[in-house]
Image: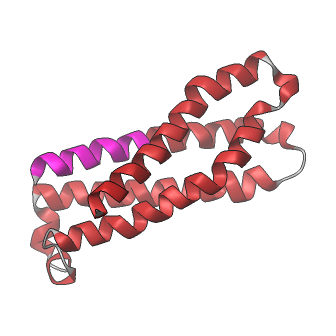
Amino acid sequence: MLLTMHLLAAMVWVGGLAFFVFVGVPLARQRPEWELAPALGRAFRPVGWVALAVLLLTGPLLLARLGFGWAVLRQAAFWSSPFGATLLVKVLLVGGVIGLTVWHDMVLGRRPGQGALRPAIRWAGRAIGVTSLLIVVAGIALAQGY
């Protein structure tokens, strides 16, 4: 059940970003008067945050279920193993995507006069997408290594 929840939340997060990148943004560029990109962003925000919360809750629980509890995670030898090093990369990427998402949603996305902020908003959105894909790659590597 935990793995199913984790994978579904990952599908919602990455799938939502993919929809935004491949459908929403091109359509918004064709019809800028619709202001579609901000509307899609506001609509996805609660869904995306719930998906991230589920990922943050289920990820550590899955680790514990696999036998990687606090005792194991405190050992330096674990982090120098291939699995531990890959997990560390994934954890750092997750921290990065959370930081970028907070900056994108709570700082840039809430400021008035977003026309001047559009390059920063676009950059943050792209960085969130790339980082999310790297997290998926790290997750696949972890699944293969275990």
Seen at 60% across and 33% down, the residue is 20
- Name the spot of residue 142 as percent of width and height, x first: 19, 51
Q: Which SS does the magenta portion mostly show?
A: helix
Query: From the image, which quarter does the C terminus lie in?
Result: bottom left
Residue 141, relative to residue 56: is it above or below? above
The answer to whether residue 71 is magenta is no
Residue positioned most to the top: 30
Q: Nearer the viewer, residue 51 or 32?
A: 51
The image quadrant that residue 26 belongs to is top right
Identify the colour scheme used: secondary structure
Residue 7, relative to residue 21: is it above or below? below
- Name the spot of residue 18 as percent of width and height, x first: 51, 33
Q: Left or right of 58: which side holds 115?
A: right
The answer to whether residue 142 is magenta is yes
Q: Nearer the viewer, residue 71 or 61?
A: 61
**Where does the magenta region start and end?**
132-145
Residue positioned most to the front: 1
The image quadrant that residue 133 belongs to is top left
Q: Nearer the viewer, residue 7 or 78?
A: 7
Image label count: 0
Q: Left or right of 45: which side holds 110?
A: right
Seen at 17% across and 66% down, the residue is 79
Seen at 30% across and 70% down, the residue is 60
Query: From the image, which quarter does the N terminus lie in?
Result: bottom left
Seen at 71% across and 59% down, the residue is 106
Residue 63, relative to residue 108: is it above or below? below
Q: Left or right of 14: which side holds 82?
A: left
- Name the spot of residue 109 as percent of width and height, x first: 75, 50
